């Protein structure tokens, strides 16, 4: 299995590793088979022994939740298209985008964080286009 971030596929990989372990395969051999480190397999085995199948389940992502919801991001993409259209070819500044976000959604973004947000929006726009969803 290649690298993936899909929680269901990651959970399947952990379950496969435990199945191999229960059938007598060594942790090192399992690690090579499922393309992970031996330490990961060891961690999964410990979790399985401690919590059973529940120990192999995917956990919610940790960290700070995003400031903008997915719907707000889609709406923002539309607003940015309008802004760019009205700018007559001149670049739209980060401060103007931060102000737009504040006016439309009541969310504070410092202008220095706008480029990172735009990169994330570009990635999510590509995901929407790949999934066939209307943008």
Image (spheres, helix red, strand yellow):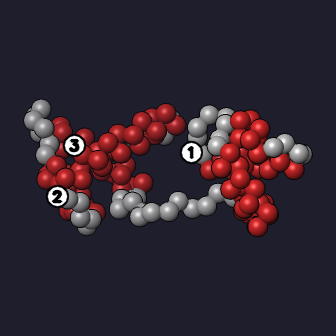
- Left or right of 46? Residue 77 is left
Q: List x then y, in percent, for residue 11.
A: 69, 50
When asked about the image quadrant of residue 67, the answer is bottom left
Would residue 15 be visible to someone looking at this image? yes
Question: Quadrant location of residue 5?
Answer: top right
- Image quarter in which the N terminus is found: top right
Residue at mark 1: 5
Query: Which callout, 3 or 1, points to the residue nearer the camera?
Result: 1
Sequence-wise, which precedes: disc 3 or disc 2?
Answer: 3
Looking at the image, which residue is at 87% across and 50% down?
Answer: 22
Q: Is the residue 80 above or below the residue 32 in the image?
A: below
What's the CA distance linking mark 3 and mark 1? 33 Å
Up the image or down, 96 lies above or below 90; here it is: below
Number of residue marks: 3
Residue under the point 62% across and 50% down: 7
Q: Residues within 10 Å of mark 2 (few under 14, many from 20)?
A: some
Calculate the distance from the C-alpha at mark 1 to the C-alpha at mark 2.
Answer: 33 Å
The quarter holding residue 66 reads: bottom left
Instruction: State the residue position of label 2.
Output: 99
Q: Residues within 10 Å of mark 3 (few under 14, many from 20)?
A: few
Residue in the image at 64% along x and 57% along y: 58
């Amino acid at each position: 299995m290649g690298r993936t971030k899909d929680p269901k596929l990651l959970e399947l990989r952990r379950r496969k590793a435990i199945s191999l372990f229960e059938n007598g395969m060594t942790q090192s051999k399992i690690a090579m088979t499922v393309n992970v480190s031996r330490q990961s397999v060891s961690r999964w085995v410990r979790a399985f022994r401690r919590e059973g199948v529940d120990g192999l389940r995917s956990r919610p992502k940790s960290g700070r939740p995003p400031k903008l919801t997915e719907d707000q991001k889609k709406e923002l993409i539309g607003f940015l298209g309008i802004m760019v259209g009205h700018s007559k070819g001149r670049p739209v500044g980060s401060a103007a985008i931060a102000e737009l976000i504040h006016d439309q959604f009541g969310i504070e973004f410092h202008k220095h964080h706008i480029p990172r947000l735009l990169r994330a929006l570009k990635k999510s726009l590509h995901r929407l286009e790949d999934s066939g969803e209307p943008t």
